[in-house]
Amino acid sequence: MQEITLEDFLKLPEGTYLPIDIRDETARSYGMIPGAVAISFDAEYEAVEKEIARLPEDKILVFYCDYGRKTREFEDIAFLEGRQCYSLKGGYTGYVCAQISEFTDLEERRKKAELSIRKKFHKQLFSPFAKACKMYHLINEGDHIAVCISGGKDSMLMAKLFQEIQKHRQCNFELTFLVMDPGYNKENRALIESNARALGIPITIFESDIFDAVDTIEKSPCYLCARMRRGYLYSRAKALGCNKIALGHHYDDVIETILMGMLHGAQIQTMMPKLHSTNFEGMELIRPLYFVRESDICAWRDYNDLHFLQCACHFTETCSTCHEDGTTSSKRLETKKLIASLKENNPYVESNIFKSVENVNLETVICYKKDGVRHHFLDDYDKEK
């Protein structure tokens, strides 16, 4: 398919064209080009043909994916014959980078983002962030925390919340805003750097070859990638004098992990608010967004007209996040939809899932593990007579 540059795309007269987003649902949740229509080309041929047939015949169709690679390869599609079609060069990522590069009022954008945390979203964002920090003792006197920034909405917001809570001076601690480049393409690297400048986050970037290392792995590349990234972050953070790394997992990640563990892993476990590192002595991992809802993060992002990375993998454009438990983005999306459907009849379902791992009654559990040792209810059953 013939490509159209972003510059020429933006010059098309209003009302003459229609952007077609072929990315998956998870990717689209991170943002779409204004006015775009979502059509998944992973569906059955006949279903896609019907979707295209419904579009106005007088519109120029501009197809886009994440980077423009998939749409550029569209060839010999019968239902597109006779239609004026283009592939958007650079895809959605190129579009977002171009939008950010036009920002000239960086100071104003930073002030607006910070003010929105203090005012409009204080209850939704800062209060639960501070609550988690206090309840789980995530920040202590003398800490040096490496705030790990992946480039997504969650870690970028986490960085701003850390800057805000540091201003309260309730205890003295240092921050290093750490970005690992595991082999990003130039567009993703530029997007992270642009957002950091716009938000006033002084990032420290280091490079690794993780993407190249897992590029040829066929089984569970995301699992291996996530484990390697965690190790690199611990290592660099410790070398910089940090004693903790902070990750941007939020409340929704927690309840989805609980439910996925049961449905796909046959186990009851949760994503802990903090952990001691087993491989890096003296290091801890903390999750200060533990009580923050994803919908509120999205609301903050959209209010401030911010655009962030979805997945930075260079060998897959359909992965939304990398999870150490090996779960795929499709399983996580499936679980997210399941929770949403259950919530329609039970508004407390989310909090009930979260609280379920706070109210475990070992007297009604058949078996559990502690420190790697398996304990069965029959071990002491006859002793209770």
Image (cartoon, grey):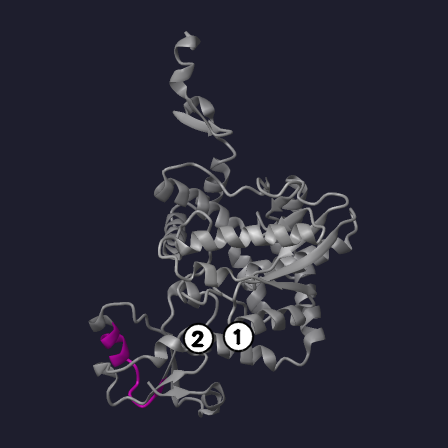
Answer few, some or many: residues within 10 Å of disc 2's Cα (few below 14, many 20 plus, some between 14 and 19).
many
Q: Residues within 10 Å of mark 1 (few under 14, many from 20)?
A: some
Q: Is residue 267 above or below residue 90?
A: above
As helix, strand or loop, the secondary structure at mark 2 comes to loop
> Residue 106, image x and y in percent?
68, 75
Q: Earlier in the sequence, mark 1 or mark 2?
A: 2
The number of discs equals 2
- Find residue 328 and report its image quarter: bottom left
Q: Is residue 362 left or right of residue 264?
A: right
Q: Any magenta on residue 58?
A: yes
Q: What residue is shown at x 41% (from left), y 82% (from top)?
A: 88
Pick the residue in front: 373 or 287: 373
Chain part drawn in magenta: 48-61
* For residue 126, side relative to residue 213 (left or right): right
Q: How far from the left and from the top, in percent, is residue 258?
A: 44, 42
Q: Is residue 222 left or right of residue 100?
A: left
Residue that badge 2 annotates: 67
Identity, as a three-letter code, of the amino acid under mark 2: Tyr
Give me the disc on residue 187.
1
Asked if marks 1 and 2 touch (Cβ < 8 Å), the reply is yes
Under mark 1, the amino acid is: Glu
- Of residues 311 and 296, the one drawn nearer to the viewer in this rendering: 311
Q: Secondary structure at mark 1?
A: helix
Give residue 47's quadrant in the image.
bottom left
x, y percent for residue 265: 37, 41
Q: Nearer the viewer, residue 368 or 384?
A: 368
Occupied quadrant, residue 26? bottom left
